[in-house]
Image (cartoon, rainbow, N blue to C red):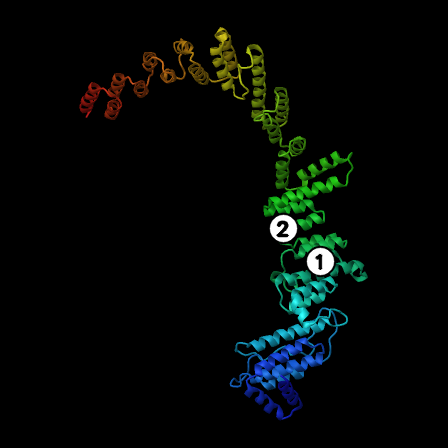
């Protein structure tokens, strides 16, 4: 390396011995080693002229690494390298925001050759030295050695420059070193934020409008490029907007936030500047439920935090009305779900009333009665009456109001029946069918009251306008469950025409294991041959089932009877009849 340095000094003085010295180094095969030592020594040197001398010596030596090529890799030929060195400016350029070359070679002749390791090391060391020399400037005051720079990395240097109030220089260094996009965005944002803070105390900037200041910040963030080609990173505009708001420039903050594209960064920034409705709108357009809820909760906290206990109700009322009137519908729906999860429904009712949603308001009150075993009868009736009243406020809630009123009447009737006949007469249920069935079933436990209970059931059927078919089905089921076969027979033999037919009677007797002849009486009264065939098969009256199959002229039904019965004579009869039909 010392021989290479002497060769460069001789070359710079125009001595013919320079070429001989360089050739002597080449013959030893240690040219690359000498180049690397010169580069490493330059990076460790504080004196700028010495740095130049060592790097130029390394550049000179790279011309001899591949002598067979017309132009060496990255170093160029000797004449071009000398021309570059002669063009370097030895003066130190002062001024924050610029990385000075300090006379260090910055470019080489472009070739199509792939750069060697020494060439790459030369370029990276040159860049590092330019940055280190700039940092060592007394105006900056961040003197670092090469080893310290390598330890804290270039990203750490940017962070330290921002921390000591040199954001413009940080932006310039990050761009020069072509650091990660996020690091460059961070330094640009710090520079724009520093400009905003300075503009509040500057007389010249005080006369600038918000639009002009915002445009200046955008140019800093976009690096004076076309906005369509800007390389800014998400969250940059939001962070600068927060700085503008803290510096007393809310208008600038609003303008900058319109350019922010990331909802996760934009919404917290809008919340921080107090634009809660805009934050909720952005979150709703992004369909992010968490951001919507965060916007709503932050707005509620801001409304209630600055009020006293006496003014809390007024502040909460203002909060809810603002949510309904100025926030997007998604915010109101989110708040509704939140309030619905709470035990106290006053806040939910207030929200639904302000939004004129009487259907949901009444439903939330009425639903508290169902499935809640802790609600007493009096409390249930009170809640239902309140729900009915709310339903009555809406024009499209007529059906819901009618159902709620009917249920209130049903609860009153159930309570009356319990007081008259005992607590076991009817269970707690919301079904009129189950109520009537329970009354008819209770007649089996208290036969002396059977006629009165039947009258009570008939009265409820008329009061709640049950369909005739529904009433007959309820009676058949109730009598069959409790074994009131006499009452079932009386119902089936009544003069009134059965609206449900006689199949339910026959099935009830068969499943209740009653005499088959009793079931046959009702099967014979069925009007459909197919029904009679199926019922006779279930009753195992094979002769009548075979007659019905023969009447239907269906060989498959005949063979079905043959497969079900175990009588040999009946099976032979089925075979003959099946052959006749074929």
Residue at which label 2 appears = 264
Of residue 356 and residue 431, the one placed in the foreground of this image is 431
* Picture quarter with the N terminus: bottom right
| The furthest residue to the right | 203
Q: On screen, 358 above or below 167?
A: above
Under circle 1, the secondary element is helix
Please give the residue where the numbered disc 1 appears in the rendered image: 214
Instruction: Name the one closer to the observer, 181 or 258.
Output: 181
Residue placed farthest to the top in the image?
Answer: 448
Left or right? Give the position of 507 relative to 367.
Answer: left
Kindly identify the residue that appears in the image at 63 percent across and 74 percent down: 125
Q: Position of residue 429 (x, y in %)?
A: 54, 21
| Disc 2 to disc 1: CB gap under 8 Å | no
Task: Give x and y (percent) for residue 281.
Answer: 64, 45
Judge by depth and name the residue closer to the eye, 463 or 153. 153
Q: Secondary structure at mark 2?
A: helix
Q: Kindly report the distance in space between the C-alpha atoms of the residues bearing marks 2 and 1.
A: 22 Å
Q: Position of residue 23 (x, y in %)?
A: 57, 89
Q: Earlier in the sequence, mark 2 or mark 1?
A: 1
Q: Residues within 10 Å of mark 2 (few under 14, many from 20)?
A: some
**Does residue 324 appear anywhere in the picture?**
yes
Residue 534, x across and y down, in percent? 31, 21
Answer left or right for 544 relative to 503.
Answer: left
Horizontally, is 14 left or right of 73 in the view? right
Q: Quadrant of the C terminus?
A: top left
Q: As displayed, is residue 227 above or below residue 402?
A: below
Residue 120, relative to residue 300: is it above or below? below
Residue found 44% across the figure and 14% down from its top:
482
């Amino acid at each position: 390396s010392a021989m290479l340095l002497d060769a460069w000094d001789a070359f710079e003085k125009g001595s013919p011995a320079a070429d001989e010295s360089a050739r002597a180094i080449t013959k030893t095969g240690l040219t690359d080693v000498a180049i690397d030592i010169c580069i490493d020594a330059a990076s460790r040197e504080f004196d700028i002229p010495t740095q130049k001398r060592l790097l130029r010596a390394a550049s000179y030596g790279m011309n001899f690494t591949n002598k067979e090529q017309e132009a060496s890799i990255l170093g160029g030929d000797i004449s071009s390298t000398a021309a570059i060195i002669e063009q370097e400016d030895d003066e130190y350029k002062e001024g924050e925001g610029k990385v000075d070359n300090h006379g260090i070679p910055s470019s080489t002749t472009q070739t199509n050759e792939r750069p060697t390791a020494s060439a790459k090391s030369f370029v990276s060391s040159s860049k590092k030295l330019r940055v280190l020399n700039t940092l060592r400037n007394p105006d900056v005051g961040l003197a670092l050695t090469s080893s310290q720079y390598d330890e804290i990395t270039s990203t750490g240097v940017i962070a330290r420059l921002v921390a000591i109030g040199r954001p413009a220089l940080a932006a310039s260094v990050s761009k020069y070193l072509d650091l990660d996009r996020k690091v460059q965005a961070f330094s640009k944002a710090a520079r724009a934020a520093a400009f905003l803070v300075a503009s509040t105390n500057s007389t010249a900037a005080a006369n600038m409008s918000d639009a002009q200041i915002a445009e200046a910040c955008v140019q800093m963030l976009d690096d004076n490029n076309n906005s369509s080609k800007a390389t800014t990173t998400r969250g940059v505009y939001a962070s600068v907007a927060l700085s503008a708001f803290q510096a007393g420039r809310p208008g600038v903050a609003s303008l900058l936030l319109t350019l922010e594209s990331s909802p996760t960064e934009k919404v917290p920034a809008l919340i921080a500047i107090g634009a809660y409705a805009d934050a909720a709108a952005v979150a709703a357009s992004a369909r992010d439920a968490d951001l919507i809820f965060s916007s709503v909760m932050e707005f509620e906290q801001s409304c209630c935090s600055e009020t006293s206990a006496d003014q809390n109700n007024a502040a909460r009322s203002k909060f809810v009305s603002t949510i309904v009137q100025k926030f997007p519908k998604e915010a109101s729906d989110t708040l509704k779900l939140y309030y619905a999860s709470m035990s106290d429904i006053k806040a939910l009712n207030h929200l639904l009333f302000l939004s004129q949603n009487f259907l949901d308001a009444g439903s939330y009150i009425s639903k508290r009665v169902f499935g809640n075993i802790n609600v007493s009868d009096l409390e249930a009736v009170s809640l239902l009456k309140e729900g009915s009243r709310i339903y009555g406020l809406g024009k499209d809630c007529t059906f819901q109001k009618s159902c709620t009123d009917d249920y209130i009447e049903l609860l009153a009737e159930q309570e009356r029946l319990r007081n008259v006949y005992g607590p076991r007469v009817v269970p707690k249920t919301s079904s009129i069918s189950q109520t009537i069935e329970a009354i008819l079933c209770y007649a089996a436990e208290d036969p002396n009251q059977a006629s009165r209970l039947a009258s009570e059931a008939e009265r409820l059927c008329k009061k709640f306008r049950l369909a005739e078919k529904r009433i007959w089905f309820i009676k058949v089921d109730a009598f069959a469950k409790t074994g009131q076969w006499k009452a079932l027979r009386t119902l089936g033999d009544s003069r009134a025409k059965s609206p449900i037919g006689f199949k339910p009677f026959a099935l009830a007797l068969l499943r209740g294991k009653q005499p088959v002849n009793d079931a046959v009486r009702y099967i014979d009264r069925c009007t459909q041959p197919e029904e009679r065939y199926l019922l006779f098969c279930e009753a195992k009256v094979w002769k009548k089932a075979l007659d019905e199959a023969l009447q239907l002229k269906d060989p498959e039904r005949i063979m079905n009877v043959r497969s079900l019965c175990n009588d040999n004579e009946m099976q032979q009869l089925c075979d003959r009849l099946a052959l006749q039909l074929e």
